[in-house]
Amino acid sequence: MLILECPYCGVHAEETELHGGGEAHLKRFGPGSSDDDFHDYLFMRENPRGVHLERWRHVNGCGKWFHAARCTQTLEVFATYSAQTTEPPQEVKDKISAKRPGWSWREFKG
Amino acid sequence: MSTRLAKQGRLIDRSKQVEFSFNGTKLKGFAGDTLASALLANDQMLVGRSFKYHRPRGLVASGSEEPNALVGLGVGDRFEPNQRATTTELFSGLSAVSQNHWPSLNYDIGELNSKFFSRFLTAGFYYKMFIHPRPLWKHVYEPFIRQSAGLGKAPNKELKDADTYEHFYFFADVLVIGGGVAGLQAAKTAAASGAKVLLLEEKSYWGGRTPVDGGTIEGLEAEAWVEKTLNELNAMDNVTIRNRTMASGVYDHGYVLGYERLTDHAPGQGGPRHRLWRIRASQVVTATGAIERPLSFAGNDVPGVMLAASMRDYLVNWGVTPGKKVVVATNNDDAYRTAIALHEAGVEIVRLVDARESGGGELADKARELGIRVECGRAIAKVKDGKRVTKVAICAQNGEGGAREEIEADAVAMSGGWSPVVHLWSHCGGKLIWDEAQAHFRPDPERAPTSHDGNAFVVTAGSASGPLSLSAVMADAAAAGAKAAEAAGRPAQSVAAVETSEVSEAPMEAVWFMPAKADIQLRMKTWLDYQNDVKVSDVQLAAREGYESVEHTKRYTTLGMATDQGKLSNINGLAVLADSLGAEIPQVGTTTFRPPYHPISMGAIGGEARGEIFQPLRKTPMYEWHDKNGADWEPVGHWRRPFTYLRPGESKHDAVNREVKNTRENLGLLDASTLGKLIVKGPDAGKFLDMLYTNMMSTLKPGKCRYGLMCSENGFLSDDGVVARIDDDTWLCHTTTGGADRIHAHMEEWLQTEWWDWKVYVANVTEQLAQVAVVGPNARKVLEKLNAQAGGGMDLSKEALGFMEWKDGEIGGFKARAYRISFSGELSYEIAVAASEGQAFWDALMEAGKEFGVMPYGTECLHILRAEKGFIMIGDETDGTVIPQDLGLHWALSKKKEDYIGKRAQQRSYMDNPERWQLVGLETVDGSVLPDGAYAVGQGVNANGQKNTIGRVTSTYYSANLDRGIAMGLVKHGPKRMGEVIDFPGLDGKIYKAKIVDPVFYDKEGEKQNV
């Protein structure tokens, strides 16, 4: 059971307080988009062994969605950060780079 | 025969006799016995039958690794199957029954069967034997296998577990798992740093194996050192210790589950039976010891063949010997300890065969001095089959098993070397390395499980790390304790060497087959996994058939898949697989270790969450009234809603029909408080709702209501309900009863993660309001009467409050909001009042309604009324695969909006396909009620020879108003096939013929609500 720090309320929340929301930073495709773009948006997900950017909700707590950058292999948590962003902030990227030089995830790199 | 000796038995109290029963026979043991030691003391060598072949089985081990001695324990509401005799402490009145035999333990039909069938029961036999012909599987093979296989019997389902259980939370700097000398030392060292330490031991006693094995620590005999150290730890405020508590699993970020057995050894003393410890530890020290491995020789499963160190445990701890004439077989020095201990206790060691040509060290010399006949380079060829050991054939280790010497014996002690208990280390990702010298996998300290900060959080101590000698164990344990405390943030400390004395040992030698080139006849009788009946020949067969991966071999042969999870069998099995594949053992690798280490009770997992507190119940403000007035409760999400209100002597069917007719003819009241009520407010609320609903909500005028549909992003219908616009920037969204929390979360998710710059708040006010649907031709009359009685109130006339409008004001003196909406097709007002006034308002309606024929109605009546009108119900007409277009709801899909959640998905080719099943009404030709969920069949058959399906029933009821069955369903090309009759085969064998009709069965023009 993971422990993640909710960036909104500051609680170090145990996984029973949290709800996993899958991959972070999805770009929504709506009407007018191509079949391929929409299909990828709806179904294709990253499943890396290593650095991953995820959505979590502090559901049995403050109720806020947030993002977590963590390593699926070592369970290391690099950072948690606001869900109101389309890409990880530079300081989060730096924290990942410090532990995993040369990392990349979708279009994001260290 | 196995018997109790006059001396020894450091754990038993011979002054306290304990009576118990096994298979109905009354037996006696002593306080301090385990069920296993007490059975042995009574010469009960045979304790169970094996899983597949029903072979007679006896005790192999003395601890939780025991694979054979599983019993049904207790009676009635305290009966529990598959309990290990070795971990069951004896108590007065204990009742145990053996398992997996028929008709009796001694005489078993299955054993005869398996002797006949065993050549067919090889690895993968299910797949090979029982595929064809198909019907034989169902009628012959499956019943046979179900009768003969399986372990204990399930408890009587009518009886509820009489015991209670609880959860307990604990936080520690350092958690030490295992109370042997290594665990005690690690805890002591960690505690000296000031760290908060928790020390857990699964057994009732402390010290692990060392008091049995011998040696001194800090100048004290092991037992004395254990007592002294325990006293020291007990005296420290920063140390908590628990025996009878097993750590069952190590999980992410230092989470560990502990399983404390509080009253298993003393039933009836009160309090919870088991306690589940939910522990968070900064650092975990696994001082879990090592487990001895069996040797692979033919007949190594005959009762009386036992692990050598376990045999020594029975002797030293409980004063029991499993035999009077014992053969010892080994590949290491430790088994000599057993031979010496038994010899000194007066048991004859008829032979000690040491597979090593070079033999043993100091202990071997001592054995020879005592006159024990030791033979090196020798092996056991075979132990004669039977219900106990009678004859043992000895041969050369380096051969095929010929030139045997047969000797008489009644027990065999075997030792194939030791494997560290690496389970807890491995649960959360700790890796292993192969130790060639000890022929075992041990934890690789360089690749420990890591925590949130990327640093190791598990460290092993003692023989769990690999070393077996006492000096190395104690040094490793002290270092582990210090390392854990430092990693938990305590100051570093220099660790003083722990002074020990012990006997030196000669190196062991890996022996995976005994004899080394055993022929097929021997290999077919050589067991690897006792509990799942997997033999050397099975693993070899799997390898020949191409199962190269250890994970595949495991599943094909079931090696290590029993409840002991291969504690004894895994390493031997891997070695056999590696040998068969011509690979090295480390290349083959291990299977995955998963929690729990040892089975834990479901009761402990559930804890206090049973009965009423299993899940909180949600009750409306009028719950008590419903309950007193005949409510037949139906669960709807976490709510309970009245299904119908039963009058004395009335059947449910009659009650529902009464409510249905009365609501259409007079006046019905429905407690609609459970409907979800979400306030959506803010400058961008209209824009937001336009995205959430398929239709336009931003154009709704204040004071008006609109029915809306919500879809998921992949286009499927998710929820529906009436939306009311309250003012310029406020809307109130009704959701389904089950949907309130889900839709609230759905709104929050989109607002927080996609449109976070939109200015919108959402509040779930469901429980703030009581809502009553006042329905029927007399609905307006009763409300106007209430207003008249109160001397005025809101104007509820058709002109002042039209259909799909709402208004705030007073009704009968209650502050109320009235919505003129209808889910029944009748004149209907849904009136919301403060939750605290719900009951008073309901009472007022019931009282005033008497002259108008008022009756409360339940959810079934609600369903029938809506089905008569062809209104869909989320969860009936929808199931997560249905889009609004399937239900003919095109009118609710805005064409003006560029976008809404689900719009793009509904443009996909499959969603646009005219072949999709579509909503229609269904009327049986004979007026009967269609079975719920029935499928319609059409022309032709599918690839499996089954008739093609062309539709299914989604809602079906008896309509009292129409006096016939009515139904809705999804049918291929349905709307184009009006009037056609299609077939619905029922599970009762009957074919129901139904005509496709318009789904609106009642008042098609909607005149009744338009008054």
Image (cartoon, coloured by chain):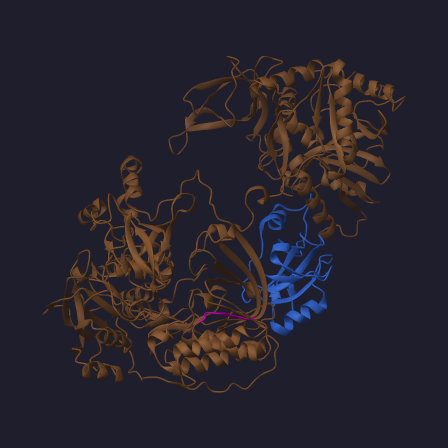
Quadrant (top left/top right/bottom left/bottom right) for the C terminus of chain B: top right
Tell me, yes or no, if residue B769 can be seen here: yes
Furthest residue toward front? B15
Vertical side of B471 occupied by B157: above or below = above
Quadrant (top left/top right/bottom left/bottom right) for the N terminus of chain B: bottom left
Between residue B77 and residue B81, name the one nearer to us: B77
Chain identifier, blue in the render: A
Q: Residue at x 47, y 18 (%)?
A: B992
Vertical side of B966 occupied by B419: above or below = below
Between residue A7 and residue A83, name the one nearer to us: A7
For chain B, give the colour: brown
Seen in the image, is B810 located left or right of residue B150? right
User: Is B176 in the magenta?
Assistant: yes
Between residue B764 and residue B47, name the one nearer to us: B47
Seen in the image, is B804 located left or right of residue B360? right
Rendered location of residue B375, percent (x, y): 16, 77
Q: Main secondary structure of the magenta part?
A: strand
Seen in the image, is B717 located left or right of residue B37? right
Look at the image and give the residue range highlighted in magenta. B174-179
Q: Quadrant of residue B582?
A: bottom left
Vertical side of B886 occupied by B413: above or below = below
Tell me, yes or no, if residue B553 can be seen here: no
Q: Residue at x 17, y 58 (%)?
A: B385
